[in-house]
Image (cartoon, rainbow, N blue to C red):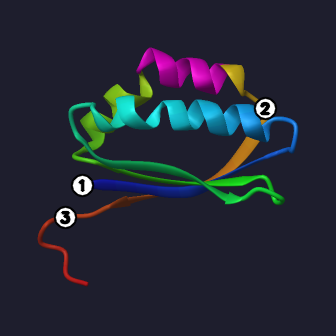
Amino acid sequence: MIVITGTIKTDKETLPALYARLKELVEPSRAEDGCLFYHMAMEDEKGCSIVAMEGWRDQAALEVHLAQPAIVKLLSDFDGKYSNDVSLHQVSSTQKF
């Protein structure tokens, strides 16, 4: 399993449109083969930050997701208008905590 967590930061002018577009992608992303969970939430409206949490069955499922036209368009439409601090974790069913 691949778990992605992170914070997306933008400016106050871009925040409403970016957050709306990210929220539009939640249900379609959850319906994709290999999606285990997919969440976007406003972390700090004044600080213009959004928190993201995603879980994917494997790298192949994540790559298919990232190639979806809606994802490609989102990244293109908001190119240069946000920054992110993202961590990718590979978790196995035999991993002990």
Q: Position of residue 17 (x, y in %)?
A: 72, 31
Give the main secondary structure of the magenta stretch: helix
Q: Position of residue 62 (x, y in %)?
A: 34, 37
Label 3 packing within 10 angstroms: few (<14), some (14-19), many (20+): few
Mark 1 is on which residue type? Answer: Met
* Residue 86 in sight here: no
Q: Nearer the viewer, residue 53 or 91?
A: 53
Numbered mark located on residue 92 in the image:
3
Circles 1 and 3: CB atoms closer than 8 Å: yes
Residue in the picture at 42% in, 22% down: 67
Q: Secondary structure at mark 1?
A: loop
Residue, disc 1: 1
Q: Secondary structure at mark 2?
A: loop
* Residue 95 in sight here: yes
Task: Name the quarter where the C terminus is drawn.
Answer: bottom left
Residue 54 lies in the magenta stretch: no
Residue, disc 2: 80
Q: Which residues are magenta?
A: 68-76
| Spatial separation of the CA atoms under disc 2 and disc 3 | 34 Å
